[in-house]
Amino acid sequence: MSFRNLWRSSNFLKWASRHLSYNSGGNEFIPFDGLVSARRCEARRSLLVEVAAMGSALDLYQVCSEFGTIRQMFHYKTKATSGPREMILIEFADSLFLEKVLKGAVYPTQNSSIIPVHSPLVWLAASKKSKPTNHTLHSGTADLPVPFTSEEKNNDVELLQNLFHCSDISQQIQTLYDYQKLTELGWRLRFFTCRQIERALSGLFPQASVLPFGSSVNTFGRRNCDLDMILELTDDDEKTDNNRLVFQAKKSRAAANPRITMQRHMEVISDVVDNFIPGCSQVRKILGARVPIIKYYQDFTGIECDLSMTNKSGFYMSEMLYIYGCMDPRVRPLVFTIRCWAKDRHVTSVFAGRWITNFSLTLLVLFYLMRTSPPVIPPLQVLINLAGSSDRRETSGIDCTFLRDLNIVTPSENQDSLETLLRGFFEFFSNFNFKERGFSIVSGNDFVKPEHKALYIQNPLERELNVSRNVTFEELDRLNTEVSNARYLLEGLEPYTGESQSEPWGILHLCNSSAHPIALKAGNISIDWKEFFTRDELSGSVPSKKKSVTVNTTVNNANTSFNNVPKYQDKSRKNGSSIKVSRKENKEELLNASDLNGLVTKLKGRVGNKNTIKRKSKGVPYSKINYKW
């Protein structure tokens, strides 16, 4: 059954209304098709309204309830280029009520330059009858007759405190996952963003569908993760050969080259997104990439978006990860913790480049869980063998068939705790021969690498591809080093001692760069300033003489580019994660504090480029500084 027919089914809508208050920790398995279809139904009957303050919720409810029944309301704040916004998402009981609201909405009359776009994005104008009171603006949510949820921004300090006071590492891992996983509002806003593009193109393409994939739907996404979308202009499931009436259509000018055709279509769509769809800003066309995409930021939902028109293999890959995440309750918390560790240790990066991606890192965790004794999850080939006729999927010649119903899968006999699995992950891969062996989650085995690449991880669906072919040998060495370091750190950890504990422990100690109280973060450089000064200098008296001083700087945020020197953002990761700077002078001399002026700026701009830094003022040369990576 197609997605369109699935959400039209009245029986399915009744099931969705009973079961889809989504909770990834729940015991009942929700099929991926059902999850996506129900979320799309929610988006079709949702209205996003900009308000003056959260207290306007009661006034907004009174306005919208005149058009139909309201199920629930969500409040959140988002930052935009024009300033912070107060937003309320309303879900109606039926999409017909939403259409009534949009028919009654008007365009701003005081601005003749606006483009009259008809979309479920509106703002609540002030009432002309009476001025809003303080009671209306700052209260009014308690009197709402429908569920009302207000979501605040992540409080990292609260998370650190909760992690610090957990009873063991297993509880820390679960707490980290519960805090960072995608919320109910996060799910709704992502499907609403997809629906916005879908609705904008519905005039020419009434069968168009925009499906999210990646972290937004595979249940491994964090709260602020990006939104990846696939645009399909037709619904292939509804094709029939019996109808003699055929649409007149225009032939592509580059029909012989499908890639050029897709690039031209995406260029037109990007112009529509940039010029006509409300809230879409910072639109960039990246059409020369292997997978052409349109990147933009949705100001009203606060989501970074990537829109593509490729095949649905990415969507089915997300379904596969979703199934593995539902197979055992320990899978998602473990993946979240490994990703958090990798981000903190700069093994991964938010920028595309030569380092391992979160997707490849997730496959590392899944492969390890297939190799435990007994296995926590089965290889993908087991799910393929159990697949029935209703599980068959194919897109662009790629077979995406595997079991979709986990109710027939026997739970794992492995009873290891999350702490045991975390320790086992680092021990397993610290002994894994990455330079000679690759692995696949299809078979659950490793093998001799078929190509000379630093890291070989077989694509589970397109099995002739290596999903980690971008990783360089230098980054593989860094991965090996960080995995070994994490293993030794965990082996040397002492158990939590209670309220008197004063040092970071557990995964806080494992990810120590984000919890270190002394480090001063400045771009790509984290410096402990106490290493620069003697005790006399710290107390305020600076001696006149100098002596030999060694300054250690540590790369702390290598995935952040500098506005002034963007061309050096990759060099800070080369061949290691630390820089040793030595200054050799007379042993009787002390380093003067004034010599440190501008040192950080110079390190940012010239690290890895020159071995000598000279003063620009007065032509006084600096002493040589040697960089050892």
Image: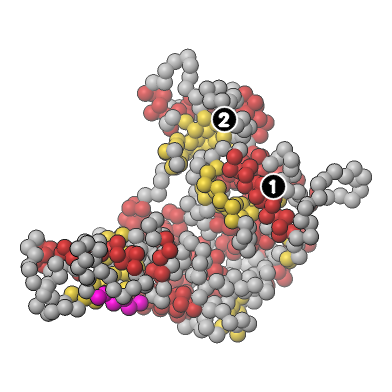
Up the image or down, 135 lies above or below 589; here it is above
The residue depicted at 15 percent of the width and 64 percent of the height is 593
Counting residues from the start of the chain, the first of labels 2 and 1 encountered is 2
- Residue that label 2 marks: 114
Where the C terminus falls, by quadrant?
bottom left
Question: Which mark is in front, 2 or 1?
Answer: 2
- The answer to whether 474 appears left or right of 597 in the picture is right
Q: Nearer the viewer, residue 59 or 15?
A: 59
Q: How far from the left and from the top, in percent, is residue 289? A: 61, 61
Q: Which residues are magenta?
A: 624-629
Mark 1 falls on what kind of element? strand
250 or 226: nearer the viewer: 250
Image colouring: secondary structure
Amino acid type of the residue tagged 1 in the rendering: Ser
In the image, is 551 to the left or to the right of 560?
Answer: left
Q: What residue do we see at 60% from left, 85% from top? A: 448
Q: Residues within 10 Å of mark 2 (few under 14, many from 20)?
A: few
Query: Residue type at mark 2?
Result: Ile
Above or below, 137 relative to 483: above
Looking at this view, is 560 or 87 the one in front? 560
Separation (CA) of disc 2 from disc 1: 27 Å
Q: Which mark is residue 209?
A: 1
- Residue at the image position 65 percent from the left and 65 percent from the top: 409
Quarter of the image holding residue 513? bottom left
Residue 26 seen: no
Residue 83: percent from left, percent from top = 42, 38
User: Percent from the top left, x then y, of residue 51?
Assistant: 47, 31
Residue 127 lies in the magenta-colored region? no
Q: For this view, does 59 lie left or right of residue 252?
A: left
Q: Nearer the viewer, residue 54 or 305?
A: 305
Question: Which residue occupies 31% across, 59% down?
Answer: 522
